[in-house]
Amino acid sequence: MQVLQNISLQPYNTFGISANAKYFCEVSNIEELKEAFSLKEHPDKFVISGGSNLLLTKDVDALVIHINLKGISIIEEDNNHVVIKVMAGENWHEMILWTLKNNYGGLENMSLIPGKTGTAPIQNIGAYGVELKDHFVSCEGLNTTTLEMQSFDKEACEFGYRDSYFKNKGKGKYVITSVNLKLTKTNHNLNTSYGSIEEELLKNNIKNPSIKDISNAVIAIRQSKLPDPKKIGNSGSFFKNPIISKEEFLIFNSTHPEAPFYKISNTLFKIPAGWLIEQSGFKGKRFGDAGVHKKQALVLVNYGKATGQEILNVAHTIISEVKNKFGIAISPEVNIIR
Ligand code: EPU
């Protein structure tokens, strides 16, 4: 394992932000990962994986460790189910394509989410009615202080909406090295409850969809409204959908009866941040090279040379406008490095 100096992180973050790592190394197995974490001459470490949920606002004055652990294997199997072990550096979408090729069901609704598999549990990624936690069995991680491997079952991960133990009490303490997922081999549990999936299937005249059909529908929907990070730098949803109390919701709903919402429980309601941002006039707005995507207001984009700080400034402007207009606080879901 080689430690390089002054490496551009532009290819390692999907926002395409130009920032440098003072030191940089790539790890391809657990031993190398442990070695990187034991380098005493580099006390500050910064782990980078798919870089798809990351906004860099300055150079990183640390040893950046790029996770390149690869491999997918079957660790348990019966007639109906399979448990696969996916190493952290496997691209999430390519891994889903592999499951579909083998007719393993469960992940199809989460097709085309950018990033690598190891970061999926950190924010319990999800899309179109399915979340990682629905198929999660366990994950393994390196404790970066003791350099011991540790296993986390579903309960230990404390999953919530775009949230987990790794974003809270476990923050910065572990590097996830692999994820075990339980998938179906037969009687796939299809989830087409999300309106736009049904519309897309209907459009293509598909009445009895296969898991591949659902994946294709999700891919088509995402491609129609989310920018491809290879063409326009972005990090998917920049903001989380805010969750508000019933009291706040009743006031909001009486003044904005047209607003979409999801009832989470008898006391909690989720409001789509994309709607709040669009209604605040930001959809498609551009501030230099930083902007708000024209088809999905939740997504901030880098049209070319925006700096992380410029993207962050746009985010702050949006947060305060939404607060002024609706009295609702929205917050970023991306990891902002300041
Ligand atoms: N909406 C607007 N304007 C917009 C965007 C959305 O009015 O610019 C409205 C839509 O009309 C709809 C509602 O907001 O009524 C919800 O929109 P949508 O179904 O597109 O989903 P979302 O809440 O905007 C979430 C996830 C996405 C995920 C989709 C589909 C979050 C923060 N985002 O978006 O996740 O793909 O649902 O399940 O929960 C990601 O995390 O990177 C991501 C793209």
Image (cartoon, grey):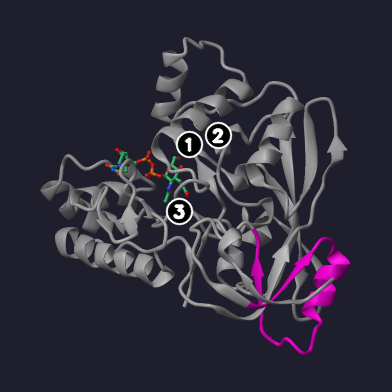
Q: Position of residue 330 (x, y in %)?
A: 32, 61
Whether residue 56 appears in this view of the structure is yes
Cβ atoms at labels 1 and 2 below 8 Å apart: yes
| Alpha carbons under labels 3 and 1: distance apart | 20 Å
| Alpha carbons under labels 1 and 2: distance apart | 6 Å
* Residue underneath mark 1: 128
Lower sequence index among marks 3 and 1: 1
Q: Nearer the viewer, residue 41 or 260?
A: 41
* Magenta-drawn segment: 22-49
Q: Nearer the viewer, mark 2 or mark 3?
A: 3
Residue at (80, 84) in percent of width and height: 39
Q: Report whether the residue tagged 2 is closer than 8 Å to ligand 1.
A: yes
Q: Position of residue 9 (x, y in %)?
A: 59, 67
At label 1, the amino acid type is Tyr
* Residue underneath mark 3: 234
Q: Quadrant of the N terminus?
A: bottom right
